[in-house]
Each structure stands twice: as structure tokens, then as C-alpha cells.
Image (cartoon, rainbow, N blue to C red):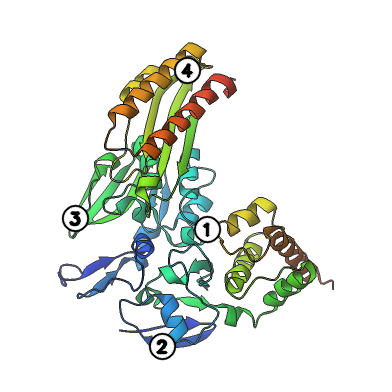
């Protein structure tokens, strides 16, 4: 069947079979390489994408069900200003997520920052619960989230 | 629509199905009607007497929208479902409707006397959640209605993943009302054990009417009643589940004996 949806701000039309997962068609048809599949249970976050504003594991979504949705992957998000706040925070705190979990980590941080202007530790820990990649200390991730929130706050107030 | 296309499959979120499936999604040789776009299934409604949740409302939305009105034990049960990203997808209808499994929210909702609406072409019926054994192929679970009651004591604990490892998971739920420090209407269930949810009426009856805090003697008697209940539940519980349920009961009774302080 043919479906169309917004992929990183552009209309994307593709042929899918009812047995395909969203993660599969993003990789094969959409040439999206930040989406990786590993656990296929929605636990590892390496296949995370933002669908209609919510971070979700794309391995758990049948491709046919996203017709008409707005999907943002790391490729699309990396072209926004918000992305650079997070990367700058990573650089300053020394957090460096590996290629496996990088996409999920960045999109999860973005979802936290959209919900909380000044995120606190329980909120960050809750959002990251279930992230099983051991590459980066959660303490560094927490520092990065708080720092990125600070940059956003400064931007809102018009300070550098 | 279903009447016009009787051979179609009704498909909702499918989160549980996808979690249980390694590799490709199961192949369908029939057309699919995708229900997630039906607005009626995505509504949350509150009246003075009950909270009504559409079957396709994501768990995260229920937790967020209802954090001031959701009963504490139910909020805990919903928080124990999957990871935050999975909670963006999973729905309460999916949590209740999966075949041969009773998942995290089932025992809490059952103890709260919740009812569910099952709808088929031109007909609908409301049934007690406890009587929901399976949903017919032509039926869909559309709404869950949770009556408001003043549960003073609410406990929920869960271990394991009831969907993927039902033999190694367990939930423990207690709801009770209190009146001047006396427990009344205590309800208790051991869930997440696969197909069944276990209730011990002896345990409930023994604790109902007891004054808080519990005495040491009452603590021991309640433990004994629960132990004999667990021993008689041969076949329903694995050794791991028996051990954990005993630990949960010890913890709960210790709360009533040592921690709970009645203030009014």
C-alpha cells in the first residue's frame, strides 16, 4: 500500500507492506541512518523518532499506521537551532553518547526541554529510564540537559 | 464500515503485539481498518461520579492529564508500563485487551469496580472488568469507566514484565477505606501472573475492621492467612511469584503495623 507522511518537514510518499515496521522503511526507503534497530521492544531507544511531537520507538510502530503523521528524525532535528544547544551542552560537560544511542538521547533531551523550562533530576531520570546504553554516565547527561535548558532560557531572555 | 467489509481486521495501536514480535510484523491476508484515528476513542471525560477513558488514549496522556484526579494506585500502575517512550504509544485499551494476559493496570482497575464498554456493529454493552476474559473478533473495547471512591490506603507494586515474561512478573495492589482509624472495605489482588488475577477473600475479611496501627498478633495472623492462600494457589503462581508476593505482603503489613499513623 502507498502511504504519505511528513518526514523532516518534507512530504514523503512510499510503498509499504503491512509487515514492515516504521524503523525499516525509514532506513530502507527514507535513507534515514540515525534510526537503528536493536531490541525491537521499545527499550533501547536507538530507533527513537519524534512523531507528532512525542518521542516514540519506531521499531514498535507498523509502517502503515503513520499515514499523515509528522515525523522528525535526528537528521531533521540537527538542522534546527535547538539541536545546537544540546550539542554545545554535550561538549561542555564532556558527555559523548555513542553512535548507537546518540539519536535517542538527543531526541529525548529535546522532549524534556519542550516540557520543562528548568528540568529537575527526577524528571530527567524518568525520561531516561529504560535507556540501556552504558556509553555515557547519566550524571553527565543530566548536566547536559540542565545546561541546554540554561542556554534556551538565555535565548528566550535575549542574552548571549 | 465493518458491516460493509466483514473480512477486515480491526487494528488499534498494536504496541503489545509489536513488543511480543521479533522480526517483521505478522502478515495479514486481509484488509485492515486502523482505529487509532477514531476521535471518540481518544477522549477522557470526567463527571462527579466517574472518570471515563477512551481505549486509544496513550498512557502518558492519562498520567499527565489526570495526575490530580487519577487514583494514586492507578497512576503507579500506569507509570510501571514500559519505558517513557513506550508509554507515549501504549494505551489503556491495549493494556486491558490483550489476549491471555492481564497486565499492569488490570488488577487496580478491577479492584476499583471499573467497567468497560465493548462495542460491535450496532450494539454496545458494559461489563465489569473482572468479567472481561476475551474480546470477540468483531468487538472492540471502546471505553473504561472508573468510579470515584475515597480510597485512603492505596498501594501498588510491580516487578518484571508481564507481557514478555509472565512467569517472572508480579503485581500487588491494595485499596482500602478508613474511618476513624479503622480499615473498612479492604480489597487486595495479586496480578500480572499471566491469565489470572488472584484475590484472597480471607485476607481481605480479616483485615477489614482492624484498627490502625496493627498489633504484632494481628500482623502474624494476617501473614499466616496469606501464606496458606499462596500455598493453595498451586499452579497459579510460580515459586518466584510466591516468594515475591509474600515479601510484598510483609512489606504492606509492616506499613500498617509500624508506619501508618492515623490522623484526622
The numbered mark 2 sits on a residue in which chain? Answer: A
* Horizontal side of residue A93 vs B53, given as left or right: right
Q: CA distance from mark 3 to mark 2?
A: 35 Å
Q: Is residue B110 visible?
A: yes
Q: What label sits on residue B219 in the rendered view? A: 4
Q: Which residue is mark 1?
A: B84
Q: What label sits on residue B248 in the rendered view? A: none
Residue count near mark 4 (Cα–Cα under 10 Å), binned few <14, some 14–19, many ≥20: some
Residue B33 picture quarter: bottom left
**N-term-proximal mark, 1 vs 3:** 1
Q: Which residue is mark 2?
A: A13
**N-term-proximal mark, 4 vs 1:** 1
* Horizontal side of residue A72 vs B12, given as left or right: right
Residue A47 in the image, given as x and y percentages of width and height: 50, 72
Q: Is residue A75 above or below residue A130?
A: below
Q: CA distance from mark 2 to mark 4?
A: 65 Å
Q: Give the SS element for disc 4.
A: helix
From the image, state whether disc 3 or disc 4 is nearer to you. Answer: 4
The numbered mark 1 sits on a residue in which chain? Answer: B
The numbered mark 3 sits on a residue in which chain? Answer: B
Q: Which residue is mark 3?
A: B136
Q: CA distance from mark 2 to mark 1?
A: 29 Å
Q: Give the SS element for disc 3.
A: loop
Q: Give the SS element for disc 1.
A: helix
Q: Give the SS element for disc 2.
A: strand
Residue A75 in the image, given as x and y percentages of width and height: 58, 82
Amino acid at each position: 500500500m502507498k502511504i504519505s507522511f511528513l518526514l523532516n518537514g518534507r512530504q514523503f510518499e512510499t510503498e509499504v507492506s503491512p509487515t514492515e515496521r516504521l524503523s525499516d522503511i525509514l532506513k530502507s526507503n527514507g535513507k534515514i541512518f540515525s534510526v537503528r534497530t536493536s531490541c525491537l521492544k521499545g527499550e533501547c531507544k536507538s530507533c527513537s523518532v519524534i512523531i507528532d511531537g512525542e518521542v516514540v520507538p519506531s521499531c514498535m510502530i507498523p509502517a502503515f499506521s503513520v499515514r499523515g503523521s509528522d515525523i522528525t528524525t535526528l537528521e531533521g532535528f540537527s538542522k534546527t537551532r535547538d539541536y545546537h544547544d544540546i550539542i554545545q551542552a554535550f561538549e561542555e560537560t564532556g558527555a559523548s553518547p555513542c553512535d548507537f544511542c546518540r539519536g535517542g538521547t538527543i531526541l529525548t533531551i529535546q522532549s524534556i526541554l519542550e516540557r520543562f523550562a528548568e528540568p529537575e533530576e527526577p524528571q530527567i531520570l524518568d525520561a531516561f529510564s529504560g535507556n540501556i546504553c552504558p556509553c555515557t554516565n547519566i550524571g553527565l547527561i543530566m548536566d547536559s540537559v540542565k545546561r541546554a535548558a540554561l542556554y534556551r532560557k538565555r535565548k528566550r531572555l535575549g542574552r548571549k | 464500515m465493518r458491516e460493509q467489509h466483514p473480512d477486515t481486521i480491526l487494528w488499534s495501536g498494536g504496541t503489545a503485539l509489536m513488543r511480543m514480535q521479533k522480526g517483521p510484523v505478522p502478515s495479514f491476508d486481509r484488509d485492515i481498518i486502523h482505529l487509532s484515528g477514531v476521535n471518540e476513542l481518544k477522549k477522557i471525560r470526567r463527571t462527579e461520579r466517574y472518570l471515563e477513558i477512551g481505549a486509544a488514549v496513550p498512557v502518558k496522556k492519562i498520567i499527565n492529564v489526570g495526575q490530580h484526579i487519577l487514583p494514586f494506585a492507578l497512576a503507579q500502575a500506569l507509570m510501571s508500563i514500559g519505558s517513557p517512550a513506550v508509554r507515549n504509544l501504549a494505551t489503556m485499551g491495549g493494556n486491558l485487551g490483550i489476549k491471555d494476559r492481564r497486565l499492569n493496570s488490570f488488577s487496580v482497575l478491577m479492584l476499583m469496580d471499573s467497567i468497560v464498554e465493548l462495542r460491535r456493529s450496532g450494539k454496545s454493552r458494559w461489563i465489569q472488568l473482572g468479567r472481561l476474559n476475551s474480546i470477540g473478533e468483531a468487538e472492540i473495547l471502546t471505553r473504561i469507566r472508573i468510579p470515584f471512591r475515597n480510597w485512603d490506603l492505596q498501594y501498588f507494586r510491580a516487578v518484571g514484565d508481564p507481557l514478555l515474561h509472565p512467569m517472572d512478573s508480579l503485581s500487588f495492589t491494595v485499596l482500602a477505606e478508613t474511618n476513624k482509624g479503622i480499615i473498612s472495605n479492604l480489597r487486595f489482588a495479586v496480578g500480572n501472573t499471566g491469565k489470572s488475577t488472584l484475590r484472597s477473600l480471607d485476607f481481605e475479611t480479616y483485615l477489614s475492621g482492624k484498627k490502625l496501627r496493627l498489633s504484632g498478633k494481628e500482623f502474624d495472623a494476617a501473614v499466616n492467612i496469606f501464606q496458606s492462600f499462596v500455598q493453595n494457589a498451586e499452579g497459579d503462581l510460580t515459586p518466584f511469584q510466591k516468594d515475591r508476593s509474600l515479601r510484598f505482603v510483609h512489606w504492606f503489613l509492616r506499613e500498617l503495623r509500624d508506619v501508618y499513623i492515623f490522623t484526622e
